[in-house]
Image (spheres, rainbow, N blue to C red):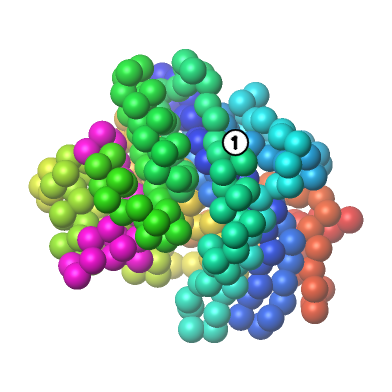
Amino acid sequence: MGLGKLLVVGYLSIDTITDAAGRSRRMPGGACLYTGLGARHAGAEVTLAASVGEDYPAAWLEAMALAGLDLSNLDRKRVRSRRADIRHLADGRRVSTHFDDPDWWVSSAELAPEWPADLAGAGMAVACPMPVGSLGCLVEDARERGVPVVADTSEAFAGADPGAILQLVPALRVFAPSREETRLLCPGLADGEAARRLARLGPAVVQKLGADGLRVVGPGGRGVLHLPSVATDVVDPTGAGDATVGALASGLLAGLELADAARAALATGAVALSGEGPAALGVRFPGITFSNAAPLGAALELE
């Protein structure tokens, strides 16, 4: 592994996940969690920088620590934890209903991620989806300290202020949006051309294509590579893209070339797809509850 830890900055949340059959369950979530677990699965030493509310289950944090995630930069605030409602539809689409909930935006402001002034000796930082103001501050702190940044975004933040995000893209080592997000950032362009347009701003671009794998574009738009997804039985797609980004950053921190890091990241993404929520990446969380059906696997350790 290269010098320094991987600092993953973002949000933790309490998720309600509903599958195509209408079965719901409550579990730990947030891009920061899945990104950190993906990076840890790929071999990185990972520090999470995030905030949670006073109602966030302590047992979940203990499980994260047991999984090897450094929580020394986690802050508990006297507010309600951020909540997400994610619904997977039979046609493969995902609907994040919380994006339309004013309370979610309030929580996003109250629990905005914070990170240590010295970036905790990080060798690389991953900026999970966050408001552009927070992203800009992180990118500037990282620039001053010579820490490369791999950044993701979400449809909520890409749609809220695409112009401001585009202004930050040149400062990134790698930008890893989904094709849905690139459509918001570069309206009117085909997916491949949008990825190249973003890469011509300076960074490498790894465009997440869901079941179609990854499109990898070199810095400045030089070279385009399409990597197909790794075959797996899909149990739960929640967080698979985030885990892929974490594993990508892990590979880059270890010194892999971009294409090799992306190939390894796809393998971790496939692991994330193969089980229920974060349990697929080897974490056993107590207190996971289901509705309408019995649990699918003992790995969830229901209590």
The residue lying toward the viewer, choosing from 115 and 212, is: 115
Q: What residue type is labelled 1?
A: Ala
The x and y percentages for residue 15 are 67, 58
Rate crowding at label 1 as few (under 14), some (14 to 19) or many (20 or more) other CA atoms within 10 Å: many
The x and y percentages for residue 31 are 54, 49
The residue lying toward the viewer, choosing from 220 and 280, is: 220
Query: Judging from the image, what secondary structure is the residue with disc 1 in?
Result: strand
Relative to 228, does residue 19 appear above or below in the rendering? below
> What residue would you read off at disc 1?
50
Left or right, residue 168 beside residue 96:
left
Left or right, residue 200 beside residue 236:
left
- Image quadrant where one finds the N terminus: top left
Identify the residue at image location x=62%, y=48%: 107
Residue 41 visible in the current orientation = no
The x and y percentages for residue 111 are 61, 40
Relative to 121, does residue 283 appear above or below in the rendering? below
Identify the residue at image location x=80%, y=73%: 291
- Image quadrant where one finds the C terminus: bottom right
Residue 235 visible in the current orientation = yes
The residue lying toward the viewer, choosing from 290 and 67, is: 290
Identify the residue at image location x=71%, y=47%: 81
- The residues colored magenta run 170-189
Relative to 254, does residue 130 appear above or below in the rendering? below
209 in magenta: no
Left or right, residue 174 beside residue 28:
left
Q: How many marks?
A: 1
Identify the residue at image location x=31%, y=46%: 165
Rendered image quadrant of residue 56: top right
The x and y percentages for residue 133 are 41, 39
Relative to 239, does residue 130 appear above or below in the rendering? above
